Amino acid sequence: MVVVDWPSETCVTAWVWTAMERRGLSGGDPSALARHLETHLPDRATPNPWGLAVSTAASHVGVRPRDAERLLPAYLQARDPDLAFRYAPVDVVAMDSHAAFLAEAMDAGVDIGAGMDVSRFSSRSDVLRHVVSVDGLEDRAVLLRDPVGQVALPSRMRVDDFVDLVGQAGGGFWLLGPREALLALRHVMPWTTA
């Protein structure tokens, strides 16, 4: 396992990287992956060791879901033709079915990231959107990990509280796994962009 010192705002890149490593696939150069995903850093005194693009628009910091949907398929296909990516906004999962949706995805070998508001775990008072890894589900609680290692997340959170934080950020679920598994997911609106 390669240890990477992730720059700020590279949570999506780190999540993809760890999902690939977990599958035994090389993620390649992490800075090249960040550039491929068009990762943007904020226009401030943020260390930028990888020379990533900078954005003055707060809405274009990190990686936007629509950019991941556009850019990740080619990256995944080059490494494993059976892998696919899907972004599912929290509101396309059937009401009160989030735990079943997460369990079904994990059972099918899908890596799950979630874009959520992590401001309550930091010193910031504004909404702080961040993609975290969902590493398991136990007794109606999700097991969480920060792929970048910069946010002091609780390792375990009730599913309902977790879904609320995803919703507060206007976030959703970042899904990477076998194409057929993503197509077969229930509890979520059908995926038509396979």
Image (cartoon, helix red, strand yellow):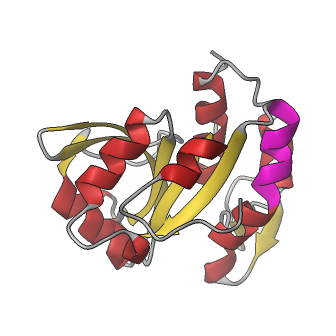
Total labels: the figure holds: 0
- Comparing 180 with 148, the one in front is 180
| Segment tinted magenta in the rendering | 71-79
Report the residue at 79% width, 65% height from top.
Answer: 70
Identify which residue is drawn at 85% across, 52% down: 36
State the residue in front, 104 or 151: 104
Choose between 182 and 134: the one closer to the eye: 182
Residue shown at 51% from the left, 39% from the top: 110
Left or right: residue 10 compared with residue 175:
right
* Residue 161 vertical placement versus 22 (above, below): below
* Quadrant of the rendering where the C terminus is positioned: bottom right
Q: Position of residue 54 (x, y in %)?
A: 79, 69
Q: Is residue 147 left or right of residue 13?
A: left
Q: How far from the left and from the top, in percent, is residue 139? A: 11, 39
Q: Position of residue 52 (x, y in %)?
A: 82, 57
Horizontal and vertical percent for residue 164?
25, 70
Q: In the figure, 143 relative to 51: above or below?
A: above
Q: Is residue 128 magenta?
A: no
Can residue 61 be seen from the camera position used here? no
Q: Quadrant of residue 152?
A: top left
Q: Residue at x 65, y 68 (%)?
A: 192
User: Residue 168 appears in which quarter of the rendering?
Assistant: bottom left
Residue 33 sits in quarter = top right
What secondary structure characterizes most of the magenta part?
helix
Q: Residue furthest left?
A: 139
Quarter of the picture holding the N terminus:
top right
